[in-house]
Each structure stands twice: as structure tokens, then as C-alpha cells.
Amino acid sequence: MSKELLPQDEKRLIEAAKSGKKPAFAQLYRLHHRRVYALAYRMLSDQSKAEDICQEVFIKVWQQLAFFRGQSSFSTWLYSISTRTVVDHWRQNKDTLSDGDLAVEPATEELHDDRDLEQLLHRLPAKARAVFVLFAIEGYQHNEIAQLLEIAEGNSKAQYHRARQLLKEWLDEN
Amino acid sequence: MKTENDLDALIAALPKELNPERDLWPELEARLEPKWQVTTAKNPLESLLLKFKPYLSFAPHLWQSASVASVLVGVLFLGSQMFDDKVLLASSSLEQRALAMQLHYEHAKATQLLGLNEIHPAFEDWQVQMGILESAIKQVLEAVSQSPESDFLLGQLRFLYEQQQNFLQKVVQSGQI
């Protein structure tokens, strides 16, 4: 988990990073990269891609930091960049990610609770998984998800329902 | 049998954060180009905009002040400077493009205002109308800073500036009839 940082300390770090100080930017990275990585990994189910995207997000943040005016919190701004970057990659890869993942054999070993769910997420079909991650974990609304993934709002709701049903079935199997 | 509540409890227990298996920072640090610092510190868009920001937004009281002519000349000069820098525009981020658009339309607006003489009574509240559009433009600019990859916002910005430009053109023409 990331350590809490006082707002004035974060502001100082941001200002230092804006002036090109990499150690300050490194601290901002250390505070926020796990959440960026979690989003990318859960959406794409690919560790290597998630690592690349995590780096790409922070390169964008570094390049655009001069234009961050503090009208929203830094984390809101950063996660907005993260979501858009991850979703762009998801869209580019959705054909190769799409529904065939269901064919993956269920894990044979005994799994437990939240670790179960974490692993089962990756068995979900791509679209259902993306909607589930954005709605249930990241807190987006279906209308926002529909816009991000370029699908109908009703489709987003249906995919979420499908994801829940599958997860419940799989959890019962264990 | 897992209930909906069981599932909700499991979802709530999922961590918001996950650790990558390797340290990504050293690779990332190597990819952070130092030229960014140059771009930021000497970016003509940023520095000129900050320097002249007070004059870039439409302000009725400025129009009535004695210094309006010099302000408009300044904006005209800025606008022409900005659009000479094609390299910057070609390689810019969405937020930079929004700033470039802002300067472009402020430049056009300044040109239009220089042609303003008499105003037809039908447009007597033209400053109020301009202020409303200006306020909408400011809101979109704020949104751009929060959603730096939204092309939709850039479209909104262009639409509002064009509305303002068309309206101002009518105001200017009203005094020429």
C-alpha cells in the first residue's frame, strides 16, 4: 500500500518534479505506481504489458506535469491519464483478448477468498473483465464505462452482470 | 453457494494496488528525457501564455481602458509568434494544442476587436454575451487540464471559440451597416 503523504508535501514534490527534479518524480512514482499497475494488469491480464503501460503512464505524467494546475488532486489527474492509457491499449488488443479466455481450465489447486477472486478475474472474457474492473474496483459508472470502452451503457451493465455470474459460479466450484 | 453479499465482500476486499514483480523505476528513469525540462522551461506557449495570461481573456473593462490598443497589439504579436512555431504544434500534447487553440482564437478575436467601431443597438449586450461564452471556454479549458487526452473537449473548445468568433463578427458588422 502507498504511504499517505500530506497535501503540502505532495505539492512540494510536484513542484520539484515540474522543475525537472527526477528524485522528486521518483517519489511520486513510488507513491502511485502500484495502483496504475493494478489497473493495467487487471484490465489486460498480461504482466509484461501492464509493466510497459505503467511506465508509459508515468512518461506521460512527466511530460505533461508542467500543465497540471492543481485544479483537481494529483491522484485524480494521474489516474485519469492511467485509465485512458490502459483503455487505449485494451481497445487495441481487445480482439486478441476477447472471449476465448473462458476456455482456460479452472485452477486445480485450492484457492481462497480474495486471492481466488484476483485469479478468477483473469479468466473472465475481455469485455466482461474490463467492465468489472472499471465498475467494481475503480468505481466508474456504467455511462462513463460505456464512453471509455465505446460500448452501449446497457452492454456495460450486461457485461458486469455476466462477470458477476461467472465469478460466483467459479467461486462455488472451489 | 456464494451469495451476492459474499461476492460484494470479496470485491471490497480486493486491494486497490498491486506490486509489479520487478522494479520498473530504473528503466523508466532512463526513458524520462531531459529535453522535457527544456521544453517546459522554454516552451514558448507556456511561458508566453503565463506572461500575458491576464490579457488573453476577454475582459470588458480592459476594452474601455486606455491600454487596450497595446494589449491587442501584444496579443496579435503573440498569436503570430505562436503559429510560426509549427514544430511545437506538430509534436504537442492535447493540452498544448488547447493552449495553441486558445492563442489562435484570442489572436483572431483581437483582430476583430480592432475593427470594432459603432455597435448596433441590437447588440448592446454584446459584452455580456461574450462574457457567457468566455466563461464556458474557461470551464472547458479547466476540463482539458483534468482530462488531458480527451479529444472531445478539444472539439468543444473549438466550437465555443467559433461561436464567439461568429458572434463578434456580427457585432463588428452591425456597426458597418
Image (cartoon, coloured by chain):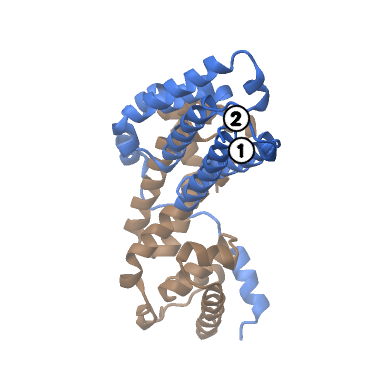
Q: Residue at x 48, y 35 (%)?
A: B105
Label annotation for residue B134: 1
Mark 1 and 2 residues: CB-CB less than 8 Å, in contact? Answer: yes
Amino acid type at circle 2 is Phe
Q: Position of residue A87 (x, y in %)?
A: 43, 59
- Of the pair A27 and B146, the residue shown nearer to us: B146
Which chain does the numbered disc 2 sit on? B
- Image coordinates for residue B97, horizontal then vertical, percent: 41, 39
In the image, the chain rendered in blue is: B
| Residue B104, numbered circle | none
In the image, residue B50 above or below residue B101: above
Q: Could you classify mark 2 by the number of other residues whose Cα lies within 10 Å: few (under 14), some (14-19), or many (20 or more)?
A: some
Do we see residue A170 in this rendering?
A: yes
Q: For the residue marked with disc 1, what is the amino acid?
A: Glu
- Image colour for chain A is brown
Seen from the viewer's position, the closer of residues B24 and A87 is A87
Chain letter for the residue marked with disc 1 in the picture: B
Q: Is residue A4 left or right of residue A67?
A: right
A137, above or below A32, in the image? below
The answer to whether residue A20 shows anywhere in this view is no
**Residue at the image position 39 percent from the left and 40 percent from the top:** B93
Number of numbered markers: 2
Say left or right for A62 vs A115: left
Cα separation, mark 1 vs mark 2, equals 7 Å
Q: Answer with the quarter of the image where residue A72 lies.
A: top right
Secondary structure type for disc 1: helix
**Image position, residue A156 (x, y; %):** 53, 73
Check residue B58 in the rendering and tell me which mark sits there, or answer none. Answer: 2
Q: Compared to A116, does A28 lie above or below?
A: above
Q: Check if mark 1 and mark 2 are on a common chain.
A: yes
